[in-house]
Image (cartoon, grey):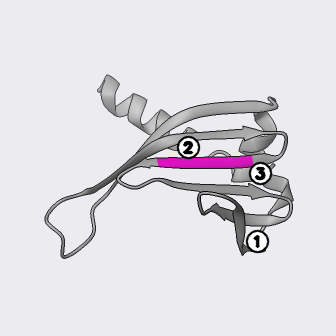
């Protein structure tokens, strides 16, 4: 019974905020961490597992995937950029200022 109550509390809190409200509660100029993402793609037996690190600092989001391949992206007020080993190249003009 306790597990069910905790689950219901968690689910209700998860839907209590939209992304803008949630971001307004996060008051920091520097966020860094690591990630691990698992995807199951239909038609494939094995799951796709990627991992790396990310940072959000000074209005710039950077994500560096280190496994299974190296890939770096950056999002700032000028758009979305992908690192080719030497330079960041713009791949999309999309930028939502309220997320930063």
Specify which label sits upstream in the sequence, 1 or 2: 2
- The span shown in magenta is 61-65
Q: Main secondary structure of the magenta part?
A: strand
Q: Is residue 48 magenta?
A: no
Disc 1 is placed on an element classified as loop
In 3D space, how far apart are the residues under numbered discs 1 and 2 (Cα atoms)?
26 Å
Specify which label sits upstream in the sequence, 3 or 1: 3
Residue reaching furthest front? 86
Q: Is residue 27 left or right of residue 86?
A: right
User: Which quadrant would residue 72 be assigned to in this image?
Assistant: bottom right
Question: Which label was assigned to residue 94?
Answer: 1
Camera-nearest residue between 29 and 67? 67
Disc 2 is placed on an element classified as helix
Image position of 61 with respect to 31: above or below: below
Camera-nearest residue between 67 and 42? 67
In 3D space, how far apart are the residues under numbered discs 3 and 2 (Cα atoms)?
13 Å
Task: Indicate the position of residue 92 as horizontal and vertical percent values.
Answer: 71, 74
Which dot, 1 or 2, sits closer to the camera? 1
x 27%, y 69%: residue? 41
């Amino acid at each position: 019974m306790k597990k069910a109550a905790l689950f219901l509390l968690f689910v209700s809190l998860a839907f209590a905020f939209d992304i803008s409200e949630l971001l307004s509660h996060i008051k920091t100029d520097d966020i860094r961490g690591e990630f691990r993402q698992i995807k199951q793609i239909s038609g494939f037996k094995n799951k796709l597992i990627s991992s790396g690190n990310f940072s959000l600092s000074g209005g710039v989001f950077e994500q560096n995937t280190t496994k299974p391949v190296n890939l770096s992206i950056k999002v700032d007020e000028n758009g979305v950029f992908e690192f080719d080993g030497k330079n960041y190249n713009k791949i999309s003009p999309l930028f939502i200022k309220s997320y930063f």
